[in-house]
Image: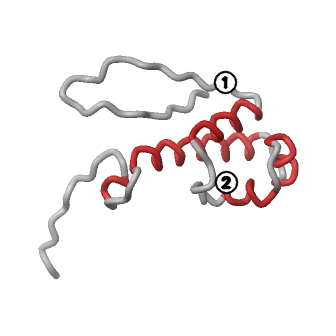
């Protein structure tokens, strides 16, 4: 058995992996999580979701499988609105010594 060191990660796995545009990737992933939850809660088939979102079904398949490179943050927010949910953006001072950040929170 080896003595492995455990390193505490940041709150963004994409940053921890050293990926470019980590903040945007995390924002898109959290928006996609919310979208997929809405699609599931509404028991929508991909073809029905595609019709509501105004995109071809393969785009919904990409979304459901978190292949998000073809989607902007704005487009993902538009999809949420198209599915009958509000999206709120709040700008406030950063907290203490922590770096300023973008966060996506889903309300029940």
- Residue 4 as seen in the image, left or right of residue 27: left
101 left or right of 46 in image? left
Q: In this view, does 94 lie above or below 15?
A: above
Task: Tell me, for residue 73, which label it has, or none.
Answer: none
Percent from the top left, x then y, of residue 95? Answer: 27, 23
| Total numbered labels placed on residues in the image | 2
1 and 2 marks in contact (CB < 8 Å): no
Specify which label sits upstream in the sequence, 1 or 2.
Answer: 2
Residue under numbered circle 2? 63
Whole-percent x and y of residue 30? 53, 43
Residue 33 in percent (x, y) is at: 59, 46
Q: Quadrant of the C terminus?
A: top right
Q: Residue furthest bottom?
A: 1
Residue 81 is drawn in which quadrant?
Answer: top right
Q: In the image, is 106 to the left or to the right of 58?
A: left
Residue at left offset 66%, top offset 42% = 35
Classify 10 Å Cα crowding around label 1: few (below 14), some (14-19), many (20 and above).
few
Residue 62 in percent (x, y) is at 68, 59
Name, please, the residue furthest toward the left: 3
**Which residue is found at the position 57% from the left and 40% from the top?**
73
> What is the C-alpha distance between the residues marked 1 and 2?
19 Å
Q: In which quarter of the image is the N terminus?
A: bottom left
Residue depicted at x 60% and y 60%: 67
- Of residues 86 and 74, the one drawn nearer to the viewer in this rendering: 74
**Label 2 Cα neighbours within 10 Å, binned few <14 / some 14-19 / many ≥20:** many
Q: Is mark 1 on a helix, strand or loop?
A: loop
Q: According to the image, label 1 marks what residue? A: 86
Question: For the point 82% across and 43% down, which residue is it?
Answer: 54
- Note whether 37 is above or below 15 in the view shown: above
Figure coloring:
secondary structure
User: Tag 2's secondary structure?
Assistant: helix
Residue 61 lies in quadrant:
bottom right
């Amino acid at each position: 058995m080896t003595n492995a060191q455990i390193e505490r990660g940041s709150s963004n796995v994409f940053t921890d992996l050293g990926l470019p545009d980590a903040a945007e990737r995390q924002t898109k992933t959290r928006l996609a999580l919310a979208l997929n939850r809405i699609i599931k809660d509404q028991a929508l088939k991909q073809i029905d979701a595609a019709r509501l979102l105004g995109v071809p079904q393969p785009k919904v398949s990409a979304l459901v499988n978190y292949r998000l490179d073809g989607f902007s943050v704005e487009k993902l927010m538009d999809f949420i609105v198209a599915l009958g949910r509000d999206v709120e953006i709040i700008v406030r001072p950063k907290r203490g010594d922590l770096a300023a950040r973008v966060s996506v929170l889903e309300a029940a």
